[in-house]
Image (tube, rainbow, N blue to C red):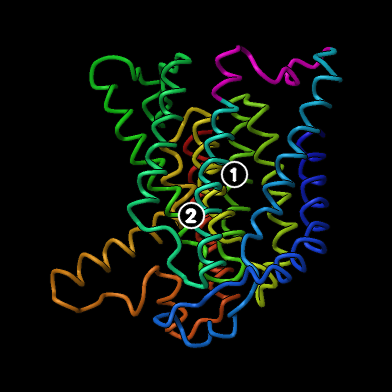
Amino acid sequence: MIPSIAALVAFIITFLLGYKLIPYLKKLHFGQTILEIGPKWHKDKQGTPIMGGIMFIIGTLISVILAFIIASLIGTNGVEYVSVFHSANETIRFFAGIVMALFMSAIGFMDDYIKAVKKQNLGLKARQKTVLQALVTVCYLLTLYLTGLQTTYIPFVGLVNIVSGCGIVFWPIAFVFIYGFTNAVNLTDGVDGLASSVTVVVSLFFMIASSLFFKFEATIVSAALCGALIGFLVWNLHPAKVFMGDTGSMFLGGMVVAMSFFINCPIILILAGILYLAEALSVVIQVTYFKLTHGKRIFKMSPIHHHFELCGWKENKIVAVFSLVTLIGCTVAYFIIR
C-alpha cells in the first residue's frame, strides 16, 4: 500500500500545484519562445509558461518523504519487505541518485531562466551545459564508487564485477550512459505530453522491476514519480497549459537513470527507454548525415517526433504511439529480467 499512497499523494500535490504555479509563471512572463525552424503551428504555443516541471518535482519529493515516514512507522512488524534500506552505503547511493537528478534539474532551471528572461530559445550554451552535466555525472559515479558498488546486473549473464579486469570499463560506459540518457529525455520533450506520458510508462516499469529486485525504496520513488507525472499530464496534454521546460525534463532524465541504478541494472534502460534512445539517435543520425552530404537530410526534422509532425501526425497520436512503443520496450525488458 505504501507505493500506492506515494503515487496518490504525488498526483494530488502536482495537480493542485497547477492552480497556483501556472498563473504565477504567467504573471512573471516566463513563457516559451518558439524557434523559427520548428513546425509553423508551434507558433500558437508562444508564451506558454515553462518551468512547470517544478510541479512534479515537488510532488515527487514530498510524497517520497511521506512514504518513507510511513514505512519507518510501520517498521518490519512481521513484514520483512518494509525494511527500506539494507546498509548505510545503499542509503547513500539511493539519495545520491535523487540529488543527481535535482542537480540536473538545476542545470535545466538555469537554461529555462535564461530563455524566459532573455526571450530566446537558446538558453545555456552547449559547452556550458555539457560541462555542468559532466560534473554532476562524475560526482554521482564517484559516490557509487566510494560507497563500494562492486557489481552490476546484466541480463542472461548475471552479476558482473566492475572493480577488476574488463569490468572497469563499466565506469566510462556509465558516464556516457548517464549523460546520454539525461539529454535523450530532454530531447523527447518537444510535443505536448510526450516526455510526461513516456516517462509514466518507464516509471511503471521500474516500479515493477524494483519489486523483483526487492528494492522497496526504488518502488516508492517510481510510484511517486508516476503519480506526479499523471498529475502533471492534466495540465500538459495537448493543448498544453504549461511546459515542463528543461527544469522538468532534466530532472526526469536524471531520475530515469537513477532508477536504473537503484535496481543495479542500468543496461535495461536500453529497452525500457527505447523511445528516449530513438529520439537521441535521430538527432545524431540527422546531424551526421547532414554534414557528410553537405545539407541533405534523412528526417524532415529531428528529433524524430518532429518528423512525424511534419508527416501530418497530430500531437496526441504521436504521444499515443510513442507511449505504446515504450510499453512494448518495457514489456520485453520485464521478461528479460524476470
User: Type of residue at label 1?
Assistant: Phe
Instruction: Using the rendered view, name the quadrant where residue 88 is placed.
Output: top right
Magenta region, residue range = 78-93
Residue in the picture at 48% in, 57% down: 186
How many C-alpha atoms fall within 10 Å of the one at disc 1: few (<14), some, or many (≥20)? many
Name above or below for residue 17 compared with residue 261.
below
Task: Describe the element under mark 2 as helix, strand or loop.
Answer: helix
**Residue 25: x %, y % from top left:** 70, 66
Residue 83 magenta-drawn?
Answer: yes
Measure the alpha-carbon separation of dots 2 and 1. Answer: 16 Å
Residue that lies at the very extreme toward the front in this rendered image: 118
- In the picture, the quarter occupied by the N terminus is top right
Q: Position of residue 234 (x, y in %)?
A: 74, 65
- What residue is at 19 percent from the left and 78 percent from the top? 295
Which of the labelled discs sits on residue 205, or is there none? 1
Q: How far from the left and from the top, in percent, is residue 85? A: 66, 18
The residue beneath circle 2 is: 185
Q: Residue at x 53, y 82 (%)?
A: 42
Secondary structure of the residue carrying numbered label 1: helix
Kindly indicate the quadrant of the structure image that contains residue 132: top left
Horizontal side of residue 178 vs 82, given as left or right: left
For the question of whether residue 331 can be seen, the reply is no
Asked if 201 appears above or below 216 in the picture, the reply is below
